[in-house]
Amino acid sequence: MSSRPDPAAAPAVADEDAAAVRLHEVGHVYDGAGGPVAALGPISLTVPSGTFLVLVGASGCGKSTLLRLVAGFEKPTSGTVLTGGAEPVPGRGAGIVFQQPRLFPWKTVGGNVELALRYAGVPRAERARRVPELLERVGLHDVADRRIWQISGGQQQRVAIARALAGDDPLLLLDEPFAALDALTRERLQEDLRRVSAQTGRTSVFVTHSVEEAVFLGSRVVVLTRRPGRIALDLEVGLPRTGIEPDELRALPEYAALRAEVGHAVRAAAA
Amino acid sequence: MRVLSLLALLALWQLAAAAAGNPSFVPAPRAVWDQLVLLSTTHDGVRGYSGHLLAEHLGISLRRILVGSALGVAAGLVIGVVLGAVPWIRLVAEPVVTFVRALPPLAYFSLLIIWFGIDETPKLWLLAIAALPPVAVATAAAVHGAPTGLVEAARALGASRWNVIRDVVLPSALPEIFTGVRLAVGVAYSSVVAAETVNGVPGIGGMVRDAQRYLQTDVVVLGLLAIGLSGLLIDGLLRAAETRLIPWRGRT
């Protein structure tokens, strides 16, 4: 069911593992309007390869900051962040899905995915083959020639996920990717992401403020306190990753228990 | 509706001409029409105006406008991208662009004549210099204000600095650049008469200037109409190109 990760075993695995994320005493302070603001930490966290880690916390707890540090968009003001054993650089080793799809409107749907493949160094002939393949993988058919504004918000976010998967990076980072979608679409995308994630087994860090989403998607859930964000709860989720229908999963008693535990921790941490 | 307003305008013009009672002051539409026919044909052994048909005058001016604004737009694009992308160059060079923009074309035309003579070169220079600032300013603003979200998304996909400029910054700037180009062509249009004040025949501006000397008001009016109408046409073409080239305009 759920247990705390073994603190002794995890780092030993991570040292050898290119896909893992390691945070050591990471803190981040930025210049706000009224002086410096401590956004995060200090936090130490090790994510072994293959983990689907969900960071959950109230808005403004620094979870998005943490993701930007792991993506390499910003450098921590203290401590070290390592992905694959090296300092993270944007565009190297991690695919990113943002809250907004951030697709390029001057490209078609297929063109957006194609561009990602090009940046990843995939040769032209192979790109033509892989674009429809990637779109299929996120549940999109016959949309490659459409314009971005001709598909729905949910479909746009699917394209963004396909684009992030294009580079075959060992790490996938997702910053509240479903927060702007309606409830029904969000649920379907969660189910599809869970399926895709189980298929690829890619190390993922997913940021959300939704307890439901955290428990449904995560193989490990970390709850952050309010600013400056620290770890309030670190939970290994023992739910089955494959061979189970989403509705069956949600009906499991362990699922309800986990949701209650995480929900309680989030509320306590935000107080 | 448009036809109706056009007819109303014509009627108003006719009334004004009748009221003025002096064809050298306000020529009647009929007189201008006769000039159009006269200048478009060879009559009494005279070919059009000063040996060139109206269409030839207009064609030569249009060619100057086209080449001049093409040069100005190309230079404006390069300067705009540099201004938008490199803050310290923007700081130094932006006042220069604004300075040039404030100068009336006739003011620097004298200098261009001293440098380049009286043939085609100074005319093209004048039009290029007139067309450059609108494009440079629009491009600089658009490049500077490139959407950070999209730039970040491209970087996350592994785009190099050059990739980001080519695939994100420039396409996202395209709508504003296009507005700059339309402005630039407009400025080149209004500068063509200035460019053709010296040795401007053949050329529609030169024709208007000569006609003014001899008080051929109907020819002056005809020239103005030719410039204005062809300008409308060119702007229409640019707009059509814009909707084709930038289908995402207004959709983001």
Image: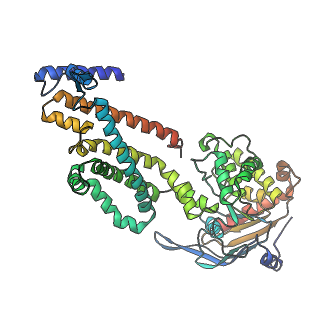
Determine the residue located farthest toward the right in the rendered image.
A243
Which residue is more in the foreground, A118 or A175? A118
Is the residue B120 above or below the residue B158 in the image?
Answer: above
Place of residue B240 in the rendered image (x, y in percent of width and height, measured from the top left)? 46, 36
Determine the residue located farthest toward the front in the rendered image.
B45
Place of residue A45 in the rendered image (x, y in percent of width and height, measured from the top left)? 72, 74
A164 left or right of A28? right
Place of residue B150 in the rendered image (x, y in percent of width and height, measured from the top left)? 56, 56
Is the residue A170 above or below the residue B250 in the image?
Answer: below
Q: How many marks?
A: 0
The answer to whether one can see residue A116 in this image is yes
Which residue is more in the foreground, B196 or A155? B196
Residue A213, quarter of the rendered image: bottom right
Q: Which image quadrant: the N terminus of chain B?
A: top left
> What colouring method underlies this structural image?
rainbow
**Residue at image coords 86%, 54%:** A252
Place of residue A216 in the rendered image (x, y in percent of width and height, measured from the top left)? 78, 56
Residue A44, quarter of the rendered image: bottom right
**Residue at image coords 72%, 49%:** A128
B196 left or right of B145? left
Which residue is more in the foreground, A33 or A89? A89
Is the residue A34 above or below the residue B206 in the image?
Answer: below
Which residue is more in the foreground, B47 or A57? B47
**Residue at image coords 28%, 56%:** B100
**Residue at image coords 12%, 31%:** B215
The answer to whether one can see residue A208 in this image is no
